[in-house]
Each structure stands twice: as C-alpha cells, then as structure tokens.
Amino acid sequence: MMPGERALYDRLWDEALAYFRAGRVEIDPLLVRREFDDRRGLTLAARLDGAALGRLSGVLDDLRTLAPEQHIYRPDELHITVLSVISAAPGFDLARVPVNAYKSLFEALFAVTAPFTVHLRGLTASRSCALICGYSPDGALNALRDRLRAGLRAAGLADGLELRYQSTAAHVTALRFRAPPANLDALAGSIAARRDADYGPCPIHAIEFVVNDWTMSHDRVRLLARYALGGRAPE
C-alpha cells in the first residue's frame, strides 16, 4: 500500500468517527430531491471490472441492509475518478464546452499510457460518505493525473479543473448520506470491521470521458468517449 494513500484514508476515518460518535453526518439533501439537482460536469473515470465488482457485492449488500435510507451506489455506478475535468456544479452547459479539443488531447495522451492496476483494500468513511479504499501500488494513477493536468493547462483547457479538490487517491465511493442514519452505530461498526479487508486487484484498461451528475448516476451519465490505454481495444 502507498503510505500517502493510507494516511489519507486513516485521517478521513478519524474525522468521520468524531462525527459518528456525536451522532452526526453531513447530509446532501439534493440526493433526495434529485429533480432539483442540476449539478453537472465532465469527468475522466475508470470503471471496475467484473471480478472486482463480484468481490465487492457483499459490501454493497450490507450497506443496503444497514442503511437503506441512504444513497448507495449501484455496481454499474462504482468508479475511480481519474480526473474532474470540469467539477460538477449548477449551470453547466455542454454546448459551451470545446468537447472536441478535450477529446483530441485525451486520445493522444491515453494512446501512450500503459494499462495499470488499482488494488482495492479496506473501507473508510468521511462525514458525508463511505468509501472503498484503492491504492495505485506503482504510482501510475497519480503519474497519469499529473500528465493530464499538464496537458490541459498547456492547451488552455484547465478553467474548471478540480475545483472541489485535487484527486490524489484511488478510492471508490459506495454510499452518500442523504438522511439522518437510522442505525449509525451499526453502519460505523460494519465499516470498521472491513478497514483492512482485501478486495484484490482491479486492472484498468480503459478510461471513460463522461458528462456526469454529482454521483455518476447510471441514468444521468452521458458517455462522450472511451479510450483504450496504450492502444489496446476496450474490453
């Protein structure tokens, strides 16, 4: 495991526990009233393969059992954010975005980027969500992010880049709070029991370029392009 990623996940867990012990979470009310949620943006995302999704099915099942009132991601919504190209926000207008310029830049860059592997190990939480911890053992993911950032800035395409935070980890969000938890102690206990559970490797052979809402909802994501890494045909 990369020590920096582990330190981040541990810090998030410590902060979340302080909230949970006080009976508090951070709620996103727009997850209940989705018809009013117009937050949209552009994202480069890596999807989990079938084997990884199979190993995580028990986690999602337990979250649904312990916290059915929360926003729990479907298997086909689970993803690793490679880069928030334009951070999701109200007022996004795809017609004003130079999509072809982005596509050209990404096509050239991903053609010379080798496939890499993310290792999924353990759960953590923040005050607003529960996360599956991911690690890029050889640092390939953050190296790719650095090349993407440099390319976007050089092309004058970085105005909306990572406005919320700069991605440094390989986590997968599994749950977001949309209501006061009915059984927060049990939920926290289940996450704590899986802090070091090993969910194995997840090979990344392609990256999706999408228009997305806040939670990468299956019924709101629009695929703009899918890039095979290193010229390999997407599987």
Image: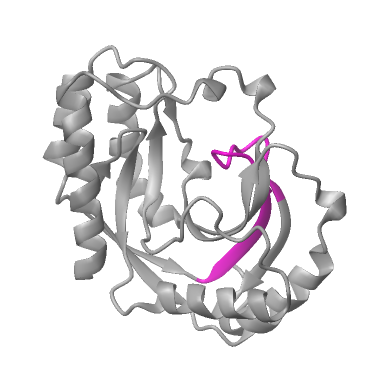
Q: Give percent across and percent down for residue 93.
A: 81, 45
Residue situated furthest right in the rendering = 95
| Res 166 seen here | yes
Relative depth, front residue between 211 and 11: 11
Q: Give percent across and percent down for residue 32.
A: 54, 18
Residue 149, located in which quarter of the rendered image? bottom right
* 217 inside magenta stretch: yes
- Residue at 56%, 23% (x, y): give it: 30
Q: Give percent across and percent down for residue 185.
A: 16, 21
Relative depth, front residue between 126 and 207: 126
Q: Is residue 8 above or below residue 63?
A: below
Q: Is residue 74 above or below residue 4?
A: above
| Quadrant housing the C terminus | bottom right
- Residue at 14%, 29% (x, y): give it: 189
Residue 66, located in which quarter of the rendered image? top left
Residue situated furthest top in the rendering = 182
Relative depth, front residue between 82 and 15: 15
Q: Give the range drawn in magenta.
A: 205-222
Residue 37, located in which quarter of the rendered image? top right
Position of 163 compared to 138: left or right?
right
| Quadrant housing the N terminus | bottom left
Q: In this view, does 6 lie above or below 58?
A: below
- Residue at 39%, 64% (x, y): give it: 168
Q: Give percent across and percent down for residue 69.
A: 40, 16
Q: In this view, does 206 lie above or below 21?
A: below
* 102 inside magenta stretch: no
| Res 212 seen here | no
- Residue at 61%, 74% (x, y): give it: 228
Report the label total.
0
Colour convention: one colour
